[in-house]
Image (cartoon, helix red, strand yellow):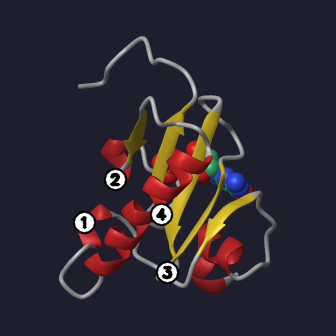
């Protein structure tokens, strides 16, 4: 497994996923443990460990992730709204150290985190 990184292994096709979107910069697939009717992980194809490692040299991938999020949200019927969540680091509850955005929706969420 490249870098011992689970999402790099998914990007490399070594581990299967339920793909919902792909372009040259981004892969998006359904979370294995969905927390909402729609729960998609949007992952840059470059290994960026977490949000702390975003800089001028790689922020392009973040833009591409959010372009993908808009496309996926429309394709998944989330025009009424959705949330995008990024967990960063130990205190943020990140469990896979490859930058990713959780796109969750398909229901009206009862609670707001913020
Ligand atoms: P986070 O905790 O923010 O690092 O999110 C990691 C997410 O990755 C978590 O919601 C579960 C998901 N996940 C873990 N392993 C796999 C896997 O093998 N396949 C898929 N599709 N999702 C996974």
- Kindly identify which residue carries mark 3: 25
- Kindly identify which residue carries mark 2: 88
Q: Nearer the viewer, mark 1 or mark 3?
A: 3
Residue 95, how many percent across, how many down?
Answer: 51, 51
Mark 1 and 2 residues: CB-CB less than 8 Å, in contact?
Answer: yes
Bin the neighbour count of mark 2 within 10 Å (Cα to Cα): few under 14, some 14-19, many 20 and up.
some
Left or right, residue 38 beside residue 105: right
- Point out the tag, 1 or 3, that comes first from the N-terminus: 3
- SS for dot 3: loop
- Kindly identify which residue carries mark 4: 68
Question: Is the residue marked 2 within 8 Å of ligand 1, measured from its CB?
Answer: no
- Kindly identify which residue carries mark 1: 52
- SS for dot 1: helix
Left or right, residue 11 beside residue 52: right
> Looking at the rendering, which quadrant does residue 109 occupy?
top left
- Point out the tag, 1 or 2, that comes first from the N-terminus: 1
């Amino acid at each position: 497994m490249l870098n011992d990184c689970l999402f790099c292994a998914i990007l490399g096709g070594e581990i299967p996923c339920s793909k919902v979107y792909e372009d040259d910069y981004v892969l998006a697939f359904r979370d294995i443990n969905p927390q909402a009717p729609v729960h998609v992980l949007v992952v840059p194809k470059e290994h960026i460990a977490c949000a702390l490692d975003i800089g001028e040299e790689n922020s392009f991938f973040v833009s591409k992730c959010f372009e993908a999020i808009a496309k996926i949200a429309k394709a998944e019927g989330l025009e009424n709204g959705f949330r995008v969540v990024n967990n960063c680091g130990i205190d943020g509850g990140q469990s896979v150290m490859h930058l990713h955005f959780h796109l969750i929706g398909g229901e009206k969420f009862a609670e707001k985190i913020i």
